[in-house]
Amino acid sequence: MIRFGTGGWRAIIGDEFTRENVRLLAQGLADRMHAEGVADRGLVVSYDRRFLSDVAAWWAIEVLAGNGVPVTLITRPVPTPMGMWTVRQMGCAYGIAVTASHNPALYNGIKVFTEGGRDAEIEVTDELGAHIAALDPAEVRSLAPHEVRDSDLVTEQSSINWYLDAIIEQLDLETIRHAHLRVVLDPMFGVAQTSLQTVLVSARCDVAVINARHDPLFGGRMPSPAEGSLAPLRQAVLDQGADLGIATDGDADRLGIIDDQGGFLSPNQILVLLYEYLLAGRGWRGPVVRNLSTTHLLDRVAAAHGEICHEVPVGFKWISAKMEETDAVIGGESSGGLTVRGHIPGKDGIQAGSLLVEMVAAAGKPLSQIYAELVERYGRLEMEESSYGYTPARREELQRRIFEQHELPAFTREVERIAWEDGCKVYFADDSWLTIRFSGTEPVIRVFSEAPTVEEAQELSRTVAHHYGLEA
C-alpha cells in the first residue's frame, strides 16, 4: 500500500517500505512517463543516508531502465534539494529522492519531483497512487542487477559542484569573508555536512561540525532540527563562542538555528528574519508565501514594506506554485523549509543556512540582537505545536467530529472566521489563530496555535486537546 502525503511516500522499513513496493512505485512512474510521452527526457534519482536508501535507489533504477527510461543517478548521499536542482538543470521530466526526511529512523520513503525540480502536485501523486494500486507485481518490468549496472540507460554522477556553485553565486561572499564568522554545523547524522561546510569555507567562515558520522539510527533521535533535539548544538555554540549554529534534518531540506546566546530560533523566526533581510538589506521587492500553519508575523513585515503575504495549504508544492504565480521573494513553512526567488521551487536547508550567514555578516551584529530588533519593530507572536497519535477508530471519530460535523470547542476569545480548505483554521479577532489537521507525513493529528504570548498559545492548544480528549 503506497500512500502519498504532503512529503511524498513514507513508510516503516520492512512493513510497507519494501522492495516490492519500491518496484511498484517505479513501474507506476515509468508508465506515467510513457503515457505523457516524456520518457526519453529521463529521470534523476538521488538518496540520503538512511538505512536501505542507496539499495532502494537501485531497486527503482532496475525497473525504470527495464522500461526504457534514461536515469541519472547521483552516486553519493546528497541533500534532497540537490536532486531537485539536478532535475531542473538537466531538463528532466521527473525525479525521485529516496528519503523519509525528518521521520524516525525506522522509516524510509520516496519523494517525487516533476519538471523544473518541484514537488509533485497532489493531482500527480493521487493519479500515480491510484495507478500503482491497480498494478500487479507480475506486471513490473525490470533489468537484472548485473544488466542495469552496465546499461547505457543509466548515467552515474558523483559531482556536487554545480549545485554548490549555484548557491555560492547567489551569496555576497565578500561581505561574509570580511565578517570572520564562526559557525557550528549539526547535520544530525544526515547529508548536509559536505555541502554546507564547502559553501561556508568558501566564504572564509571558521566552521566546526558535530554529529557528522554516518549513523542510520540518527543518534537515537529524530533527525528533525527542533528545539528539543539541538542541545548538543547549543552547547557547542556556547563552548566555542560561535556566532551561530546551523542544524539540518536528515535530507537537508529543513533547518533550525541556535543564536550566539544559545537561543533557539524557530523556522518561523528564520523565515521572518530572511524576508526582512531580503527586503531591507538587499532591496528586493515582492510578496511572501506561507502555509496556513506558519507565523502571521510575516504578514506584518509584508504590510510594513507595502507587500502582501499569501496563505496556502500545507505542503511545499503549494508554496512553490504560489511563489511562481506571484513572483514572491521567499516562501516557507513552520516545519523548517523555505526557498528564495531564483533558486529551486522547493525547500533547501543548504541555501537557507548560507543566506542566514550572509544576513549576520551584513548586519555586523550578533544574531540575537538582530532578532531582538525585529521584535521591537513588529511585535511578538508565539507559536505552540502539539501532535497527538490515534488508533484507526479514533481517527474516524476525529474525522467525523471535526472535519465533517465541524464541531469545535467554545473558545473564550472572539472568532473572526473559520476556514475548512485544509483541515481547520480558526482566525481570532486579536490576530491569534489555531489550526487542526491530520499530518500528511506521520499518523498524528497536529494542533498549531499562535498568540501574543506563549501562555495564550498554550491555552488555545489545551482547549482543543481537552475538548476532543487528545493525549500527547
Image (tube, rainbow, N blue to C red):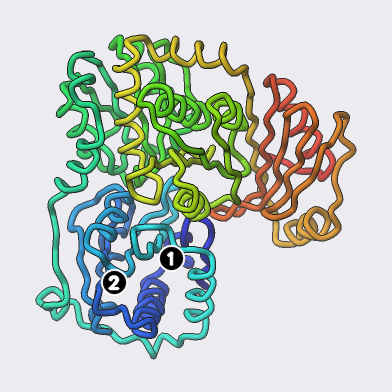
Q: Quadrant of residue 241?
A: top left
Around disc 2, counting alpha carbons within 10 Å, would you say few (fewer than 14), some (14 to 19), or many (20 or more)? many
Q: Position of residue 411 (x, y in %)?
A: 86, 34
Q: Residue at x 24, y 39 (%)?
A: 167
Instruction: Name above or below for residue 452 compared with residue 420.
Output: above
Q: Is residue 406 left or right of residue 291?
A: right
286 or 424, which is in the foreground?
286
Residue 59 bears which disc, if any? Answer: 2
Instruction: Name above or below for residue 387 compared with residue 413.
Output: below
Q: Secondary structure at mark 1?
A: loop
Q: Is residue 215 left or right of residue 223?
A: left
Quadrant containing the C terminus is top right
Q: Is residue 434 left or right of residue 307?
A: right
Residue highlighted by disc 1 = 17
Q: Report the label total.
A: 2
Amino acid carrying label 1: it is Phe
Q: Secondary structure at mark 2?
A: helix
Around disc 1, counting alpha carbons within 10 Å, would you say few (fewer than 14), some (14 to 19), or many (20 or more)? many
Q: Position of residue 386 (x, y in %)?
A: 65, 37
Amino acid carrying label 2: it is Trp
Q: Quadrant of residue 66?
A: bottom left
216 or 425, which is in the foreground?
425
